[in-house]
Amino acid sequence: MENFMQADAAREQSQSRIFDLPPGPDGTKREFDYVFNCGGETRYSQEDEVYKVRSYQLSVAVGKEAAKRGVKAFIEVSTGSVYNPNRNPQKEGDKTTKPHTKQAKWKLAVGEELCKMSGLRLCVLRFPHIYGPYAGGWIGTQLALARVYQSREPKETLKWLWGADLRTNTVHVEDATRALWMAAEWRSQNDQIPNAPNDKIIFNVVDKGQTTQGTMANIIKQIFGIETGFQNTLVNTFARLNLEHVVDDLNDDTLDDWADLQEASGIKDNGGPLSPFMEKELLRDADLSLDGSRFETVLGFRPQHECITKDEVEGVIASYKRMNWWP
C-alpha cells in the first residue's frame, strides 16, 4: 500500500498531488499512461447534491486533469442502470431517458460531459451488478437477508417482489477488472469504434448468465436451506403504490435480527459493509439487462466467470468469513 494516496479528487487543488509522479531515474518527467476513475458516491437514495459533488464534479475534475496531461486512456466506470428499464438486453445506443437511480442519473450526466472534453482519451464502461469475493452492495444485501431468514424459527419463506424473470444482470469482479485493463490498452491505440466512427466510445460489460431474480432465489435456496419464492399480484400492486412503506417494513423486520446475529458471533464495530438494509431504489420493478456483444466483438473480451453460480456465491461468503464479517 506504499503507493496509496488519499485526496479529495473533486477539488482542483488536489489534482497535482494525485497525478504528479516522481521523476524517472534520469530525471525526466513521468505521467500515468492510464487513469481508471472508479470514484464516486456508491450509496443509493442520496440527495442530488451528494451525487453532484461526489460523482459528477469528481469525474469532471479528474477528466480535465487527465486531458491536460495527455493520458493515453481515461476509463470511466459507469453503470448499466443508466438505460431505461427493459427486459431485452440493452445496447450502448439504446434509450437513457429514465435511469433507474439518482446515482445512474449523475453517472449518465458526467459521461456526457466527459465525451465533450477536448483531448480526453475517454472510454466509458457500463457494468451491471458486480459480485465476487469481498463485494458488498447488491450481493451482500441479499446474502445478509438470507442469513436472517435462515436463523429464524419457525422457518419463513424469503419472497422477492415482482417475479422470477426480473433481470438483475451480473459480472464477476475479476472479469470487471480484466475489462478495465483491456479497455485501457485498446483505447490507448484506437480513436474510434470500428464500423461506428461517430459513436461515443462506450461499452457494456456483462457475463453470459442473463441473471434474474429467479437465478438468485434458486442459489440462495440451495446454500441456506430455506424456501424462496415471489410475492403474488396483490402484494406487488400494493408495493408499486406504497414502495417506501414496504421498504420500511422490510428493514424494520430484519435489521434487529441481523444485529443479534452479529452480537452472538462476536462481530463488533458494525461488522464491515454487510447489512440486510434494503434501499428503495434497489427494490423498484426495473430490469437491469445488458448486451455486452460490442465489447466482446471489438476487444475480444470473454468473461471467465460466465454466470453466477452456487459455487461462486459460496466463495463470496467464504471471503466474508475471512474478514470476520459473517455471523
Image: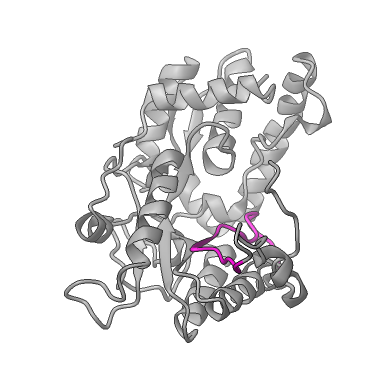
Q: Position of residue 72 (x, y in %)?
A: 44, 69
Quadrant in the rendering for residue 325: top right
Q: Is residue 159 left or right of residue 262?
A: left
Residue at position x 25%, y 72% in the image: 193
Q: Position of residue 127 (x, y in %)?
A: 42, 54
In this view, which residue lies farthest toward the left?
A: 195
Image quarter where the C terminus lies is top right
Depicted 107 relative to depicted 270: above or below: below
Residue at position x 64%, y 75% in the image: 61
Depicted 1 relative to depicted 200: above or below: above
Residue at position x 48%, y 23% in the image: 315
Residue at position x 55%, y 26% in the image: 146
Is residue 238 rendered magenta in the image? Answer: no
Depicted 90 relative to depicted 318: above or below: below
Stretch in magenta: 28-47
In this view, which residue lies farthest toward the front?
A: 26
Image quarter where the N terminus lies is top right
Is residue 32 rendered magenta in the image? Answer: yes
Task: Choose between 76 and 213: the one closer to the eye.
Answer: 76
Name the magenta segment's main secondary structure. Answer: loop
Question: Is residue 195 among what the camera can see?
Answer: yes
Task: Choose between 211 and 115: the one closer to the eye.
Answer: 115
Task: Choose between 210 and 166: the one closer to the eye.
Answer: 210
Question: Is residue 168 among what the camera can see?
Answer: no
Task: Choose between 64 and 252: the one closer to the eye.
Answer: 64
> Total of numbered circles in the picture?
0
Q: Position of residue 288 (x, y in %)?
A: 39, 54
Q: Position of residue 163 (x, y in %)?
A: 38, 43
Q: Is residue 241 left or right of residue 151?
A: left
